Amino acid sequence: MEFSSVRNTESEPRVQVLPRDEAREHLITIADMLAKVMDTTIRIPGTSWHIGLDPLLGLIPGIGDVLANLIGTIILGLATRLQLPRIVLARMSLNLLINGTVGAVPIVGDLFSVWFRSHSRNAALLRHAAMKPDRETHADWFYVACIIGGTVALLLLMIAFIIWLVYQLWMMVSGG
């Protein structure tokens, strides 16, 4: 009977484990490269503007923005592998959500993607948080709270507008 702790492991190939700093740098470099491809790969001639695959994919009706956001979640996955704080992951998720939501509006959303550059923002957040020893800050929590508060306020305003619009239409139809 052979126990796993007694086995001869000299003949088995060893997996090379990268030093922590080297592996961390490698993941950060991947995030930076992916952000560049998605946001700033192509320079628009005669301008200082750059665009990437995100706004170009957004031109594909129906699935373009979904594909761009799915590719963007790779950076989010890298942040998870680096064990970044949840607040940073929340900020990164919000960036993708904002880009995906506004990006769903034809033409305007693609122009927004060129300006907003959610993937570059996420790569910068990843790089900054991965290098900081104390990674959670009050500014992060304040940012997330403001985004959520603003979203809820905007949603409530839209609901109020729809109720007002339905009321006005009802008054016009009923003659009141």
Image (cartoon, grey):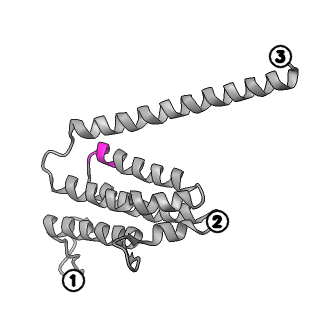
Q: Is residue 135 left or right of residue 151?
A: left
C-alpha span from label 2 to label 1: 55 Å
* Percent of width and height locating residue 92: 36, 51
> Which image quarter is the C terminus in?
top right
Direction front: furthest residue: 46
Quick one: 68 or 24, which is closer to the camera?
A: 68
Amino acid under label 2? Pro
Residue 87 belongs to the span the image colors magenta: yes
Q: Earlier in the sequence, mark 2 or mark 3?
A: 2
Q: Residues within 10 Å of mark 1 (few under 14, many from 20)?
A: few
Nearest to the observer: residue 118 or residue 42: 42
Residue found at x 26% / y 67% = 27
* 67 lies left or right of 138: right
Mark 2 vs mark 1: give the one in front: 2
Secondary structure beneath label 3: loop
Q: What residue is shown at x 59% (from left), y 33% (from top)?
A: 158
Name the residue beneath numbered marker 2.
61
Q: Badge 1 is on which residue?
A: 11
Q: Which residues are magenta?
A: 85-89
Where is residue 112? Give x, y as percent.
Answer: 47, 57
**67 to the left or right of 30:** right
> Magenta segment, principal secondary structure?
helix
Mark 3 surroundings: few (<14), some (14-19) or many (≥20) residues within 10 A = few
The type of residue carrying mark 1 is Ser
Q: Is residue 77 above or below residue 162?
A: below
Q: Quadrant of residue 141?
A: top left
Q: Is residue 94 visible?
A: yes
Q: Specify which label sits upstream in the sequence, 2 or 1.
A: 1
The answer to whether residue 150 is above or below residue 12 is above
Labelled disc at residue 176: 3
Question: Looking at the picture, how far across and down is residue 126, in whole percent?
Answer: 27, 57
Please tell me which residue is depicted at 87% across the width and 20% down the height of the picture: 175
